[in-house]
Image: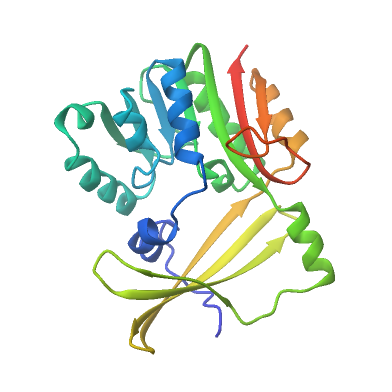
Amino acid sequence: MTIAEDLPPEHEYDGTLARYYDAYFTGLDGEAEFYTNLAVAISGPVLELGCGTGRTLIPIAEAGSQISGLERSGSMLDRARQRIGILAPDVGARVDLHSGDMRSFDLGRHFDLITLPYRTFQHLLTVDDQHRALDCICRHLAPGGRVALNVYDPLMDISRLLTNPTDPEPATDAEFTDGEGHRVRARYLRGYDPANQWMVQHFWFDQLEGKQTVETLQARLTLRYAFRFEMEHLLSRHGLRVVSLAGGFAGEAYEGWGEQVWVAAQT
């Protein structure tokens, strides 16, 4: 299986990834509950950046919070609007969606909580992108407001790759049924660009009829990883005080690699 280097120049979450997003990218254990509980505890308006199809946004609205969502991908926003359109009217009324880029948005209001779930911050592929996004975030925070986000640090994964290089043949990752009732096999190959701190994932989605593949679609997803003190420095540079750092959504201790779950407050 070859990797296509000429994939469409669309946003990565348009096209193929948006088509399979809800069935394949099902989120991280405890993630939606973590952000929902935080929103309920803060009890003020919430902004979610990179809200996608609404997987974490909708539970927050269902729990009673007023929440705005910002999303760059038009395809993902369309799916979010469809999902919100079938909610109970009082829940749907607590949601407003905006098309925009987290590096350059201006919603003209402030929020008590701004969230970046499911590693949204890692879509910022340069240090300049990170600073621009944090500038926008801080301009939208109410006094004393909080920021919550999670990122993945692949330190141990990279270490294993140095001693056991990845097999060039993509591994079968999952089989699922898409929104149109088709059975799909997903495969992926992950690579690293240490100079840029990028994780690059290539996906193959095989639509199946019986045991036969009738169509294969490819997609690529690039994320920038960040280490613990790099994240702490970025937050501090923008006047954000770390409230907590955990290694998971149940408050597990951070052990130096893997998931980083951050909560920071405006100083």
- Quadrant for the C terminus in the image: top right
Which residue is rendered at x = 24% and y = 46% of the image? 83
Q: Position of residue 82 (x, y in %)?
A: 21, 47
Against 111, is 28 above or below?
Answer: below
| Image quarter of residue 175 | bottom left
> At which x and y percent is residue 165?
77, 74
Give the image location of residue 127, x and y in percent. Answer: 66, 40
Q: Is residue 169 visible?
A: yes
Determine the residue positioned at 46% across, 35% down: 33
Q: Using the rendered view, name the quadrant where residue 98 is placed.
A: top left
Residue that appears at 35% across and 35% down: 59
187 on left or right of 75? right
When the figure is inspected, residue 215 is found, relative to residue 102, above or below; the finding is below
Q: Is residue 192 left or right of residue 62?
A: right
Out of 242 and 254, give the one closest to the viewer. 254
> Of residues 105 and 86, which is closer to you in this image?
86
As rendered, which of 171 and 249 lies closer to the eye? 249
Residue 194 visible (yes or no):
no
* The N terminus lies in quadrant: bottom right
Quick check: 251 above or below 26? Answer: above
Pick out the residue farthest to the left. Answer: 89
